């Protein structure tokens, strides 16, 4: 057999093996792909509720439903304290404590309004259910003000 025929024979053999591998890969891909209609769409709603602010000599501690406003604390240099399950913010990073509390209250109220609007429009489009009443309450442990 000539060299050319040997080379062609080997190329045909390689080609058939490649076809077999591609076929197996296609089968694997089709098994791992989930049908589009089985994908569940989840709507994540902000969690807004009771927030407690404790004022200490060097820092404040914010606990409660803070998940959706945690980035506001991080900007102020807050660190999560797992032991107290809250955000510690150094007082030196807050210019005006009262302004901070009021701004936090406004932020919570805006979140609450958005939740009510989204819940109302979402529930009406699904099954005409009335929206869930969610509230935001900020409590403060400092002696001057308490909510």
Image (tube, rainbow, N blue to C red):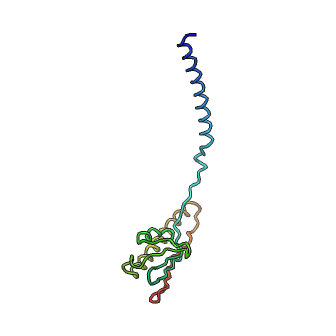
Which quarter of the figure has residue 31? Answer: top right
Q: Nearer the viewer, residue 118 or 49?
A: 49
Residue 123 vertical placement versus 106 (above, below): above
Residue 96 vertical placement versus 75 (above, below): below
**Residue 55 screen position, x and y as percent:** 47, 83
Farthest top residue in view: 1
Residue 85 vertical placement versus 56 (above, below): above
Residue displayed at 50% across by 65% down:
118
Quadrant housing the N terminus: top right
Residue displayed at 57% across by 24% down:
14
Residue displayed at 49% across by 77% down:
62
Residue displayed at 44% across by 84% down:
57
**Residue 6 screen position, x and y as percent:** 56, 15
Farthest bottom residue in view: 143
**Residue 128 screen position, x and y as percent:** 58, 64
**Residue 30 screen position, x and y as percent:** 61, 39
Residue 71 vertical placement versus 29 (above, below): below
């Amino acid at each position: 057999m000539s060299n050319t025929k040997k080379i062609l024979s080997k190329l045909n053999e390689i080609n058939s093996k490649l076809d077999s591998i591609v076929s197996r890969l296609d089968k694997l891909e089709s098994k791992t792909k989930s049908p589009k209609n089985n994908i569940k769409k989840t709507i994540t709603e902000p969690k807004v509720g009771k927030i407690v602010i404790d004022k200490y000599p060097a820092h404040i501690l914010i606990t409660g439903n803070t998940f959706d406003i945690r980035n506001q604390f991080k900007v102020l240099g807050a660190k999560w304290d797992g032991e107290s399950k809250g955000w510690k913010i150094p007082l030196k990073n807050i210019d005006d404590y009262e302004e901070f509390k009021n701004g936090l209250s406004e932020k919570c109220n805006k979140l609450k309004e958005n939740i009510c609007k989204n819940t109302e429009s979402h529930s009406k489009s699904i099954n005409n259910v009335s929206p869930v009443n969610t509230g935001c309450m900020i409590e403060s442990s400092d002696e001057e003000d308490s909510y």
